[in-house]
Structure formats: structure tokens, C-alpha cells
Image (cartoon, grey):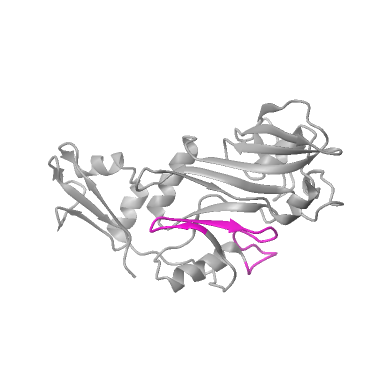
Amino acid sequence: MKPFQLTYTAENPGLLRDALGGWGISKRTLASVKYGGGQILVNGAEVTVRHALEKGDAVTVIFPNEEHGKGLSAEDGPLEIVYEDEALLIVEKPPMQNTIPSREHPFGSLANIVAKHFNDHGIPSTLHIATRLDRDTSGLVCIAKNRHIHHMISLQQQEKKMKRRYEALVHGLLEKEKFTITAPIGRKNASIIEREVREDGQFAETEVCLLQKLAGYSHVSLQLNTGRTHQIRVHLAHIGHPLVGDDLYGGKRNLIKRQALHCTELELIHPVTDERLFFHSSLNGDMQSLI
């Protein structure tokens, strides 16, 4: 399996360590390169991070191959690939599939199937799922093929350069056409699963846009500005409009047997080429039929 590598050009003289930090390579990634079998080359010769760079030097970082965790089995299964290159894999997750295995659903997750895809195509990476979706939620998922790429995507999320948009059906008729929910989210006392809005929670922000009013329901578009667990579900329940089908947070399942939530758009900057990428996904049939 050929290791993943990136090459940079030094724009100014200075220590290699500082240049690597400027290119977004974290201390953790550097440690994995140093102790995990990777290499750092300057003009083809192996060096340490204390090397003094000259302007125009070619710096190549060869990242060590990664292995799946022992608890993750590679399984055959359908995989709908939207985009793939040496750094990224964008896929469509169907409803009623875990993103990663759980105690209740140890097999058949998206991670299990992607692990088989990586094995079949000689991709030396563990699973770096950058945008997880709940089991019920369908739509676009972003997977990094390398620890460094995952780090770069995480930075984009923190800096709000990555955008994720969803469509959902909620109970009740929204009065405002556009508004933002800003309310901190934390784990609910005595529950390992359920979250709630609470003062000591983590900052969370969701933008809401009304698309259309239906008979007792609203079809909405949502943009996540933060990525808290169950964020959309908690925020909508908090304002009295829980997701249709989300019985954990007050929704009813008389119309659909899962939460009516789909990740329709994913926008990010490619962590290697700096190209802005945009992906769109149409609603699943069950949500389309409801609308």
C-alpha cells in the first residue's frame, strides 16, 4: 500500500518545524510521522524538523500507513459514492444505518462498509468520519482518508469554512421565514444518549429557513454553524417544533418511521488543492412522499 504524501514549497527561509505548522500539520500528526514510520524530505533528502529551510525548497511529508481499529470489521454492502480522490471520500448514507458501529447495531454500519472499500482498493487508512449522521438521518457524509486531512477538515469546521445544510419536516407551522437558534447543548442528566438545552452546555447555533407550510407541518432548511450531538433535533424541540418521526425529542411516528432529516448539501475547501467543493443530495423517497 503506497503511503499518502504531500509536497510543499518553502516561500521563506526558516525552521522546517515552523513551516510545517504554517501548512496546517499538527503536532500530533508530526509525532505520528516521526514514530509511526513516516518521513520528511527536503529536496529528496530525509531531515528532522530542526532543518533550516531556504526559499524554494521542496518539502515532502510522507505520512505513515494507518490500520483499522481491531474492533472494526470490514463488511460487504452497498456504498453510494458521490466523490472520491486520494484525500476525501463523500458518500450518501441511507436512513436506518449507523455511521459507526454501536452496541445495539455492531454490524452493517457505514464505517464497516467503507473499511471494506478501503481494503479492496489498497487505501492505507483507518476511518476518519468528519461529518457523522444519526442512524435515522440520511444524506451526505464526509470521510477523510488520512489523519492530517481529518485535522484540516476539523479546522474548517471550527472556522465555519465548511457548510452543512439539511432539510427536515417539523411539527407545527413556523411563524418566521428565517431565524437563528443559539442555545447551548449538553447531555441530559441520567441519560447517556439524550441531549438538552442547558446553561452549562456547549455553544450551539442553527440557522433555520422555512421552505413551505404543509397541513400542520413545516418543511424547513437548516444550516449547522456548530456540530453538537443531536443539535438539530434538540434545537427544534426546544422551540416547540420537533422533527417529524423523532420520538426521542417529542416527534410522532404516525407518518414516518424515522426522524425526517436529510443532509442535502455539503460545502468545503479541498484540504490539498484549496478548491471549493459543493455536493448536493436529493431527499429520500420517504420524505419526498410526505412533502
Residue at 39% across / 43% down in the picture? 275
Q: What percent of the width, then of the height, locates residue 285? A: 72, 56
Residue 103 shown in magenta: yes
- Residue 286 lies in quadrant: bottom right
Please report the residue visible at 82 percent of the width from the left and 33 percent of the height from the top: 173
- 235 relative to 84, above or below: above
Q: Which residues lie in the magenta part?
A: 82-108
Residue 103 position, x and y percent, is 67, 64
Q: Main secondary structure of the magenta part?
A: loop
At x 67% / y 52%, what residue is drawn? 137
Would you say residue 230 is visible in this rendering?
A: yes
- The percent coordinates of residue 74 (x first, y second) are 53, 72
Asked if residue 43 lies left or right of residue 117, the reply is left
Is 287 part of what is drawn in magenta? Answer: no
The N terminus lies in quadrant: bottom left
Give the vertical position of 159 relative to 78 (above or below). Answer: above
- Which image quadrant is residue 200 in? top right
